[in-house]
Image: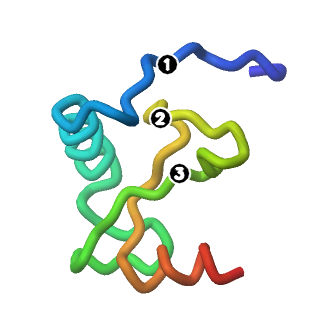
Amino acid sequence: MNGVRLKCPPLRLEREPYAGLRQQVLGRDGWRCQSCGTMSNLEVHHKEFRSHSGDDCESNLVTLCATCHAGVHRS
């Protein structure tokens, strides 16, 4: 999108909207880890970390299993 960022509502402090967004991301990704394909222990990961100005937009979120998610944060 040529460096244009879509503005997203802040969802960090409100559990209800984040729970809905989490379900949306899991559904979009077919309830599978997008790294290894497992359907167990799924988590939603921010591609661009919040600490690096990442937001809570669906486009910045991906489904990962707990093992792959931990691996992303170790590297």
Identified at 82% across, 22% down, the residue is 3
46 shown above or below 64: above
Identify residue type, mark 1: Cys
User: Disc 2 and disc 1: Cα gap in Å?
Assistant: 7 Å
Of residue 16 and residue 36, the one placed in the foreground of this image is 16
**Residue holding disc 1:** 8
- Farthest residue in the front direction? 13
Identified at 49% across, 18% down, the residue is 8
Identify residue type, mark 2: Asp
User: Disc 3 and disc 2: Cα gap in Å?
Assistant: 7 Å
Q: Quadrant of residue 39?
A: bottom left
**Residue holding disc 2:** 56
Check whether the beta carbons of the residues at disc 2 and disc 1 lie within 8 A of each other. yes
User: Disc 1 and disc 3: Cα gap in Å?
Assistant: 14 Å
**Residue holding disc 3:** 46
Identified at 63% across, 39% down, the residue is 54
x and y percent of residue 20 in the render?
Answer: 19, 35
x and y percent of residue 53 in the render?
Answer: 69, 37
Identified at 38% across, 70% down, the residue is 33
Of residue 57 and residue 2, the one placed in the foreground of this image is 57
